Image: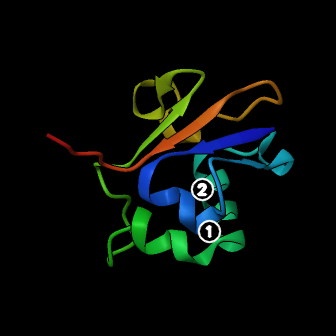
Amino acid sequence: MKINFYATLRPIVGGKTIEFPEAAGLTVMQTIEALIARYPDLKPELFRSDGTLYPHIHFFINGRDAEFLDDGLSYVIQPDDTINIFPPVGGG
C-alpha cells in the first residue's frame, strides 16, 4: 500500500510516496500512530501539544476526507485504498 504526502510533509518521510503495507487492516488513527512510530518528526506536524490532531491536516482515503467517512478516523484501511495526507497549503 502506498501513502502519498504533500508539501512540508515530504521531507520528513523522504519523498512523495512511501510503501506502507502494514496500514491494511488498521483504522485511520492507528495508521497515523504507526506512521509516527516510523517517522517521529511527523508528530509535531500532525498533533497539537495536547495530543489532538490539528484540524488543518487532512487525511484522504480514496479521495474522501476521513472526517467525512461514515466511520471517520475509525475507518478500517483496505489493501486497495489510496491514502493522501495534506498539510495546510498556502500561496498567492
Q: Please state which of residues 34 and 89 is positioned toward the viewer in this rendering.
A: 89
Q: Which residue is mark 1?
A: 36
Identify the residue shown where x is 58% and y is 51%: 29
Identify the residue shown where x is 79% and y is 49%: 20
Q: Is residue 79 left or right of residue 54?
A: right
Dot 1 amino acid type: Ile
Q: Is residue 12 left or right of residue 2?
A: left
Residue 50 lies in quadrant = bottom left
Verify CB contact (< 8 Å) between mark 1 and mark 2.
Answer: yes
Q: Please state which of residues 27 and 83 is positioned toward the viewer in this rendering.
A: 83
Q: What distance separates the C-alpha of mark 1 from that of mark 2? A: 6 Å
Residue 8 lies in quadrant = bottom left
Residue sticking out furthest to the left: 92
Residue 59 position within the rendered picture, expressed as x and y whole percent measured from the top left: 49, 40
Identify the residue shown where x is 69% and y is 35%: 76
Residue 27 lies in quadrant = top right
Residue 86 position within the rendered picture, expressed as x and y whole percent measured from the top left: 43, 44
